[in-house]
Every structure is written in C-alpha cells, then in structure tokens.
Amino acid sequence: MTNRSTIYAVFILIFLLIAGAVIYFVLKTKNITNNTSSTSSPSAEVWVKNKTVLFENVTSSDTHKLDDGTPASPAGGFRMYFQKDGKVVYADSKDATTFGTPISTGIGEVAQGDFPSGKFISNPAVLKIADSNWIMVYEESTGPLSQTMSQQQDPPGPKNQRNLLLATSTDGKSFKDAGIAIDSSKDDDFFASVPDLVKTPDGKIRMYYVCGGTKVCSAASLDGKTWVKEAGARAEDKAVDPDVLLKGSQWVMYFSTLTGDNNRFYKAVSSDGLKWTKESEVLKPDSPNAAIVDPDVVEISPGKWRMFFGEMANGEGQMGGQAQINLYWADFSGDIFK
C-alpha cells in the first residue's frame, strides 16, 4: 500500500506541475498578445472640424507660428500665406483663429481680371532660412484658369504646364521673384504643384511637391535656390497636397487623395523624410458629395494642433473651374509625433 500510495502521489504531483505550466503558458501568451495588439498600430487621430468658413474661395494655405522679437514678427503670432485674387498674400493673426485683412506679398499676375496673360499662380510655400532670409516656392500654370482647374480632364503637357517658381524676402512680407525652382518639363511630366518646405536635420532644405499629378516627390537644396530632385517617390497611389512636419528625427506627413468626391486626408510617418509609412485616415468631408484638399498643419499651443484645409461642396471630380473652395480648420489635441 505504501508503494502504491507513493506512486499515486508522484502522479498527482506531476499532473499538477504540468497543469500549472500549461495555465502559466496560456496566461503569458494571452498577455503578450494583448500587449502586441495595443501597440502594433497607432490609434487614429480625431480632428474636430470648425464649420465656420475662415476665407471664402481660398485653399492651399501655408501657416507659420512666428517667433517673438524678430523684425518680421515683433509681437509673435501666426502668419498665413495663400493665393487671393491673382496674388500671393499674407494675413497675420494673434491666435490662428481670427486673421487680419490679406496683404499682397508682391507676387502676382502680370495681368489681373480673367488672367488674360495666360498665367495663374497658386500654392505658396514659405520658409524662413535665417534672419532676414526667407524663400517662397509657388506654382505657376500656363493656360487660362478654366484649363488649369480642369487638369484632370486634360493630361499635363506644354499647353497647361505647371512649374514651381522661387521668390525671396528679407522680412517674410515683401517678396521678389528669383526664377524657376522646378521646371516640370524635365522630370515631372509637365506637372509640379503644391510645394511644402522643411529644414532637414543635416542643414539642407527639402521641398515636397506633387509630381506628375498623382504622387508626391521631393527635391533638396543647400541654399533654397538650386534644387536637385531626389530619386523615387515619397507617396504614391494618387497621394497629393503634402504637408510635412519634423520634430527631431520624427517626420509626419498629412496628404489628400485624388479620388474625387468624399475623398480623405491621411497621415504618414517616417524616420528620414524619404521612406514613408501610411497610417490611418484623419479627416473626411462633411458630405458624400464634397471633397477636401490642401491640409496645412500648425501647432497653435503646446499639444494643440490646427489643420487649415479647403473644402468644396460639389466635389473634386466636378471642379472644372466652377466649384468654389472655402478655407476651414479642424483641431486635434495630443502628440502627432507619437
């Protein structure tokens, strides 16, 4: 009996040890799985739209938080650049909510009215390189406005070519033309549009822009005057309207999609500004028939971000020079670089 009891006791002990090991393994695996699922994909950003129109018939703004005490901004605040009535203008604000009357930067059409000169300018991007040294890259399109806006129906070519031009300034207010930055006939199938400018950690300047009409490319410069296109594309699959922000070695890009009515804004992230990973959608139009374009993001206070953008009620696929685009904004509170 003693030997048999001993054997039973040993069997029971072994069984308990095995059962305990199985339970531990199951619990451990479940814990690992839960941790992985919670960190494998970033949580979606929730941007809350303000439905008040900021500016009528305006889109593709470029907004900057100004430094206190500089000659260009003795009181600090914000400055927004955009195209209005055939000219590139700027408007200042203390709070990025109410902006003053737009003032011309000096960059404008040779002829006004219905653009009889055959040129149309738009999409300014501005960067302060150093004190008393600002640059602007903006788009110039050939052909009348109706032809320019209907580029989806008319493939890019010499008759409706889009180039990116350069202007310089000492105060960020008054600019002078300084030639062509990107000649789209060379590498971009006659289509270079919607630029954005960023200082890189290595001291260069990088320009992101829509190339060929359906993807995002980039070019680099040492001085903001001479640009060299970088190989490959930064975003494809009808990605357009890039707006890029940099914090340390963390890069964030917001962009639109060229998919007609009810398109979306998306976010992408990068560790070097060249290779990007697309994340979730961040904003969509209010209506199924509407379309949103040209995101422009600025930090208005620590941890609070404002995205200015254009929205048209009739949708991108129905532009044709007729649909009006108005400028709105949406807010997000949190860390966009997380």
Image: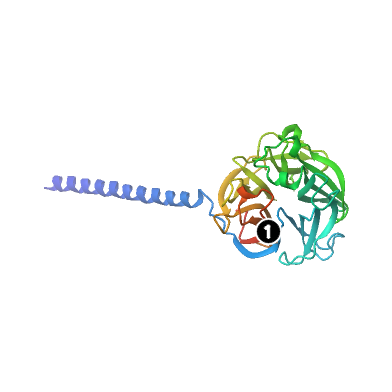
Q: Is residue 247 visible?
A: no
Q: Nearer the viewer, residue 217 or 111?
A: 111
Most distant residue in the left direction = 1
The part of the image, by quadrant, that contains residue 58 is: bottom right
Which x, y percent locates residue 239? 62, 44
Residue 189 position (above or below residue 326): above
Residue 202 position (above or below residue 54): above
Which x, y percent locates residue 266? 59, 50
Which residue is label 1 attached to? 326
Q: Residue at x 61, y 60 (%)?
A: 334
- With 165 as the anchor, is 233 left or right in this view? left
- With 235 as the anchor, is 41 left or right in this view? left
Q: Is residue 180 visible?
A: yes
Which x, y percent locates residue 119? 80, 45
Which x, y percent locates residue 155? 67, 37
The part of the image, by quadrant, that contains residue 278 is: top right
The three-letter code of the residue at mark 1 reads Asn
Q: Nearer the viewer, residue 88 or 182?
A: 88
